[in-house]
Structure formats: C-alpha cells, structure tokens
Image (spheres, rainbow, N blue to C red):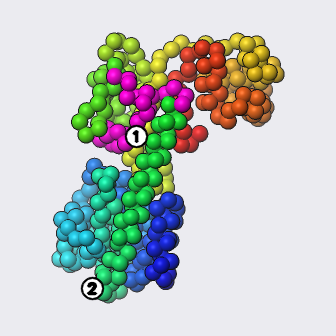
Amino acid sequence: MAEFETLVDQIYRAATDSDLWPQALHELAASVNAAGGVILTRRSDAWIGWRYSAAMSGVDDYLRSPAVARSAATVRLIAADRAGFVDAYDVFTPEEWLADPVMTHWGTPAGMLHAAAAAIQMPTDDFVVIHLTRRIGQAAFEPADIARLDAYRPHLARAGFLAARWRLERLRAATEALAQIGLPAVALDPRGRALAANALIETLTRHVKWLPDDRIALADSAANALLRRALADVSDPAAATTRSFPARGRDDDTVVVHLVPLTGEARDLFDGGCALLVVTPVAARRAPDPALIRGLFDLTAAEASVASGIVEGLSPDQIAERHGTTPATVRCQLKGVFAKTGVGRQSQLAALLATQLKLPYPPKPPNPLTE
C-alpha cells in the first residue's frame, strides 16, 4: 500500500500521463482494502473516457454497452450533492443496488459487490467520477474508509482539473498547427460545442454559423445534418458515418468538411467524444512542374518527382506505383526531400510547395495529433 504522500504524487502524475491512472487507482483502492477502481469523465449524459485498475475486468465492455444509460448510479451520486465519497448504500437500498445495471451487467458477474464513489464537477462542464469496489464476501465500506478516501478527494479534483486543462491545450495546439498550413479547424464535442478553434475557422462566416453556448453549425442544411450524424457517432471510430462531405456557402461557393475523430482504444479521460472539424477548399488539383521544384530546392530528378506527387495528394505507395519503383525507395527519396526543404512531414511539404508555386492545396487534411 502506498503511503499518503506517494499516492498523492501518483495521482498528480496521472493527470498528465493517463497511462499512470491504472496503478494510481490500484493504490487508491488498496488504501481502503478495495479490489479496484475506475475513473471516468462524463459529458452530455454520456461517458466519454475512462481508465481502470487491473482488477476491474469487464468494466470496459459495460461502459460501451446500452445498459450503462439505464443505471441510476450516477444520477443518485450527483443528487447526493456531497463533497466527498458516497457509499452505494447511502443512495440505494441493498435490493436496488443489486438490481441496478451497473451490478447486473458488470458488478455481480465480475464478483464485485460494495462500492463507494465521488462525483467532481470540472470547470469545463465535464464530471469526473471515481468509483471503487469491493468483492463479494468482503465487508461493506465503513465510515472510516470513506473518511480515508475523502482525504484524497481534493487531490483527485485538482488532478481532474489539470487533465482537463491539458486536453484543452492539446486541442488548441492541434487547431493552431492546422492554421499554420492554411486550414480552418475547430475541435468539437458531440453537441457541436467548440472546445478550441483557430482564427481561420472564425472568419469562415459564409460556411460556418456560430450558435449560443459556443456551438457551431454549417450554413448548408444538408451538410449540417451530416455533421450532426457524424458527431453523434464520434466516439465510435468504426462507425460507417460519412465524415467527409461538401458544404455550400452563402455565396454558393463549396468547401469540403472533414470530421476527424480524436478517439482511441485507450479511452483517455478527456479525449473521447471529441473531433477536429477541418475545412478545405474545393479546387482542381494539378501536378507542379518537377523541373521547377528541382530548381527551387536543388533536388534530384527522382526527389522532384516524389515531391510533385505529394503536392498532388498521392501517398508514397501511389507514387511508387506510378514510377514503377518500391514504396521503400520512395520513402528514402522523401527523406532526402525533407532534408533539403527543411520540413519533416508530408503535409508541411505540400503546404510549402503549394505556397512557393501558388498551387491549390490538396483537400485531404492531416491529423496533427497522429501524423
């Protein structure tokens, strides 16, 4: 069992590295002789991210299932309005607790029974919930156990706030990175509320409408309906929802809207349920003259052909197929292009050459968080 100061340090380190939450939750649970714990974030009446200790097997499947929406656990926890941990039996009768979906669909099959939880409101409108559980056969939580957990609650609240702020900074950095290559972008939650936006999207008033509560909509009603459906499915990377579609502006000019989900299997606390909306102009793409590229940046003929293909929006595999060579050779040539042009990414190279040669920029946007 970790000493108090050691566990507090683990909690704060987990705020900036979500991979550390499982161990921190394990130690927190051990401090009150519980089997394990889970920390979750909630927004728009849906769980958007969670991390859990090793003993909480099956909780991931439960949190992704429809059953979670029928549980009264969170509603009663929040209604208790206690600035601390709440024993499940303070808001449920034993019979009600055993009949709640959190028990029927996860707890009882996993061999868990008693629970204590705390709900913490974040300044970002998110809720953070910490849920600890004991196995069947163990005693219920005592007041002394709740008091011991309450000593950690202020640190858990600050860690949640730091994690939320860290998420906002990452989203701002992502939108600003896209602004550097001329792409209007905004990070959205499932309700269409802007979490971070660059200056380019704010001036795109022919295509984007700003609504109350920092929400956005598209001026094109058909495109806006596609956007709403895509946002509703943003937490499911495998969803077949259309995420790239044209949108007409008020002057009848057309752009392409791309919705890039920021959701991974890791279910980071504040990253689930967010997406980057990126807008690109519709423009006919044409291949730049390789000879001109070669002269501007002192490239070899092969390197100039690769650079020309990148500006067209081709992948290294497509370039290799065009020139009858291997993808490995193209990637080697691409490294040479990067070294001579001073960039490190294909998106940066395309933006640089489009600027130098006054070419339309390829519509397919990069994801600055994964490229």
Q: Nearer the viewer, residue 330 or 202?
A: 202
Name the residue tied to disc 1: 196
Q: Earlier in the sequence, mark 2 or mark 1?
A: 2
Which amino acid, by three-letter code, is at mark 1?
A: Ala
Position of the C terminus by quadrant: top right
- Image position of 68 (left or right of 282): left
**Relative image position of residue 156 (x, y in whole percent):** 38, 68
Q: Taking the image as drawn, is residue 112 in sight? A: no
Which label number is shown at residue 143? Answer: 2
Which label number is shown at residue 105? Answer: none
Contact, mark 2 vs mark 1 (Cβ under 8 Å) = no
Is 202 within the magenta? yes
**Quick one: label 2, few (<14), some, or many (20+) residues within 10 Å?**
few
Furthest-front residue in this view: 199
State whether residue 169 is above or below residue 221. Answer: below
* Quadrant in the rendering for residue 303: top right
- Image position of 38 (left or right of 216): right
Which amino acid, by three-letter code, is at mark 2?
A: Pro
- Image position of 369 (left or right of 56): right
* Quadrant in the rendering for residue 313: top right
Q: Secondary structure at mark 2?
A: helix
